[in-house]
Amino acid sequence: QMILRADGTHVATVQRSKQRGTDRASVTIPGQPPLSIAGTPGGSFFAVDTEDGTRVACASTDRASLKNQFLEVERYTLTIASNVDVAFIVLVCASLDRMFNK
């Protein structure tokens, strides 16, 4: 999935791993090293790391929560490192949710 600015300019691409049975993905940002994403089966937790292993964000949801089940929504808790663009990480998380929870 591509992340675009309002004017249509390409910002990044979020791509699911081609390996079957894995909950991994990557984020490619033109001119920058890629970010790697690893998660749990079903996408209830995932972490976004740089090439050197520095964690820039993680997201989790409680699928067993009665509130989530009753409202039929997924509510995520995001933890984002300082100096990381919050809006960008939210867009990455939305892309991942769509990929892993169709």
Image: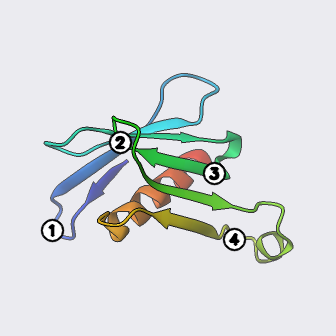
Name the residue carrying label 4: 73
Q: Nearer the viewer, mark 3 or mark 1?
A: 3
Say what secondary structure mark 3 lies in: strand
Q: Residues within 10 Å of mark 3 (few under 14, many from 20)?
A: some
Disc 4 residue type (three-letter): Val
Specify whether 7 is left or right of 22: left
Q: Residue at x 39, y 61 (%)?
A: 89
Q: Which of marks 1 and 3 precedes in the sequence?
A: 1
Where is mark 2, residue-wise? 50
Mark 4–mark 3 Cα distance, whole angstroms, equals 16 Å
Q: Residues within 10 Å of mark 4 (few under 14, many from 20)?
A: few
Between label 1 and label 2, give the one nearer the viewer.
2
The reply to whether discs 1 and 2 touch (Cβ–Cβ < 8 Å) is: no
Measured as percent of width and height from the top left, residue 94 is found at: 48, 60
Helix, strand or loop at mark 4:
loop
Cα gap from disc 3 to disc 2, whole angstroms: 17 Å
Disc with the residue nearer the chain's start (2 vs 4):
2
Is disc 1 placed on a helix, strand or loop?
loop
Count the numbered circles shown. Answer: 4
Which residue is tagged 1?
Answer: 7
Q: Neighbour class for label 2 at 10 Å: few (<14), some, many (≥20)?
A: some
- Residue drawn at (75%, 71%) of the image: 72
> Residue 45, labelled with which disc?
3
